[in-house]
Image (tube, helix red, strand yellow):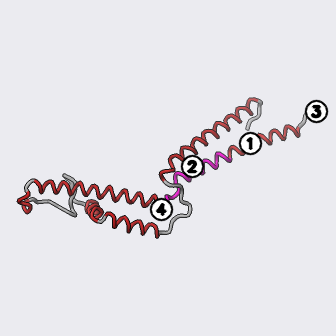
Amino acid sequence: MFDFLSFKNQVTGVRRQMDDLCNQVKNKQAELVRLRTSPPQKADVIAHFDAVINRLAASHDAALKFSIDRLSGDPLNFENTHGIGILTAAPPHAAPSLQSVEAALLALFREDVKASLRKRVEAMPWAADVGPRIVERPALIEKVERDLAALGKDLAELRRQAAEVGVLI
């Protein structure tokens, strides 16, 4: 007589293995979404703002250098040189804008603005579910994607083996 209990236990074992792999895939997918979308840490936001301030200040420094170079063309007649701006210094062939004035202010008060902004960000309430540091995320995402690929292969192999013996799962 056929041993249905043994057969049932084997099928149950395969089902458990399949469910376990599916749960692992689901968890890895959730981890991947979290790594890609979780809020940044305060330190990452502060570092980003510092970099933006440095970039804008550098753009003003370049525009101011252009103005100084124009003055250098006729140093005995500074008053005759028109269009020289300090706070309104803009890149060559560009009109001053709010962004160029912001860049000038950031160039002049760079460290004060950074310190003030850092203090304000540190004092703000922050999301409880922040993710890992931004610089760490690409490597973590790559690892989770590799894990997902391996789990996908394991699932495919389990289905293939089951199909070989006529069991569809």
- Percent position of residue 110, x then y: 32, 63
Q: Quadrant of the N terminus?
A: top right
N-term-proximal mark, 2 vs 4: 2
Left or right of 46: which side holds 65? Answer: left
Q: Nearer the viewer, mark 1 or mark 3?
A: 1
N-term-proximal mark, 3 vs 4: 3
Q: Which of marks 3 and 4 is in front?
A: 4
Give the amino acid at mark 2. Leu
Q: Nearer the viewer, mark 1 or mark 4?
A: 4
Per the model, the C-alpha gap separating discs 1 and 4 is: 41 Å
Give the amino acid at mark 1. Gln
Please give the residue where the numbered disc 1 appears in the rendered image.
17
- On screen, residue 52 above or below 9: below
Image point (87%, 38%), residue name: 6
- Percent position of residue 167, x then y: 76, 34
Identify the disc placed on residue 1: 3
- On screen, residue 152 above or below 97: above
Per the model, the C-alpha gap separating discs 1 and 2 is: 22 Å
Per the model, the C-alpha gap separating discs 3 and 4 is: 68 Å
Left or right of 165: which side holds 72? Answer: left
Q: What range is drawn magenta here?
A: 23-42
